[in-house]
């Protein structure tokens, strides 16, 4: 066999001409086969379906979870003492704001009062365990603010109601 470009005599199995570097007929005979599109295997499908089912189960469990009333009371009071009224509203009923407005108050004014008790006076907060207050779906929670020397500063009584599966602040008593 001879090189098509320079005519040098080549061995039949040579893939490249040693004189000029041109590929020979043998050199161009690389077979990669036809490329087939990727298709998921049975194991891929089973794995993806398992992950999807797991995510759905976790979402359902999370949706069914309800925070205990003490946790809700602590989160609400912490949001109020940090002036995060928007966050506190998420943990309140519409009745709370209506009740405050009927007394000439609003959540922002109450939040400023709580903020002042905690920051200006160096107060610490203790939220009591909720106690039944009338019906099964109503609880009373006492929140006490103390100065850093342990002396009591203020006492707040909050009413919580169950809305669906969640507890929400309903009144400041």
Image (cartoon, grey):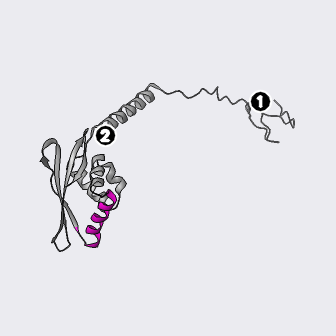
Q: Give the structural element (helix, strand or loop) at label 1.
A: loop
Residue corresponding to mark 2? 62
Q: Give the structural element (helix, strand or loop) at label 2.
A: helix
**Marks 1 and 2: CB-CB under 8 Å?**
no
Q: Residue furthest bottom?
A: 149
Locate the C terminus by quadrant: bottom left
Asked if residue 112 lies left or right of residue 21, the reply is left
Q: Residue furthest right?
A: 6
At 41% across and 31% down in the image, what residue appears?
47
How many angstroms separate mark 1 from mark 2 (CA)? 66 Å
Q: Is residue 155 above or below residue 54?
A: below
- Res 126 → quadrant: bottom left
The mark closer to the camera, 1 or 2, is: 2
The image shows residue 44 at horizontal and vertical percentages of 45, 30
- Res 112 → quadrant: bottom left
Asked if residue 141 lies left or right of residue 62, the reply is left
Q: Is residue 150 above or below residue 57?
A: below
Q: Nearer the viewer, residue 13 or 54?
A: 54
Q: Earlier in the sequence, mark 1 or mark 2?
A: 1
Query: What is the span of residues highlighted in magenta in the rendered image?
Result: 104-123
- Res 152 → quadrant: bottom left
Q: For residue 117: magenta? A: yes
Q: Which mark is residue 25?
A: 1
Label 1 crowd (10 A; few <14 / some 14-19 / many >=20): some
At 15% across and 72% down in the image, what residue appears?
151
Q: Which mark is residue 93?
A: none
At 17% across and 45% down in the image, what residue appears?
138
Taken as a whole, is the magenta stretch helix, strand or loop?
Answer: helix
Asked if residue 83 lies left or right of residue 16, the reply is left
The image shows residue 104 at horizontal and vertical percentages of 30, 58
The answer to whether residue 93 of the structure is visible from this angle is no
At 86% across and 36% down in the image, what residue appears?
5
């Amino acid at each position: 066999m001879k090189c098509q470009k320079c005519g040098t005599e080549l061995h039949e199995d040579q893939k490249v001409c040693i004189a000029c570097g041109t590929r020979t007929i043998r050199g161009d005979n690389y077979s990669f086969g036809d490329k087939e599109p990727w298709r998921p295997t049975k194991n891929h499908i089973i794995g993806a379906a398992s992950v999807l089912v797991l995510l759905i189960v976790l979402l359902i469990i999370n949706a069914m979870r309800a925070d205990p009333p003490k946790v809700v009371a602590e989160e609400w009071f912490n949001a109020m003492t940090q002036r995060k009224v928007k966050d506190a509203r998420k943990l309140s009923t519409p009745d709370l704001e209506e009740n405050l407005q009927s007394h000439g108050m609003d959540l922002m004014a109450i939040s400023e009062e709580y903020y002042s008790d905690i920051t200006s006076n160096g107060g610490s907060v203790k939220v009591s365990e909720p106690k039944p207050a009338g019906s099964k779906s109503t609880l009373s929670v006492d929140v006490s603010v103390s100065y850093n020397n342990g002396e009591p500063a203020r006492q707040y009584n909050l009413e919580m109601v169950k809305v669906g599966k969640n507890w929400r602040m309903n009144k400041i008593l």
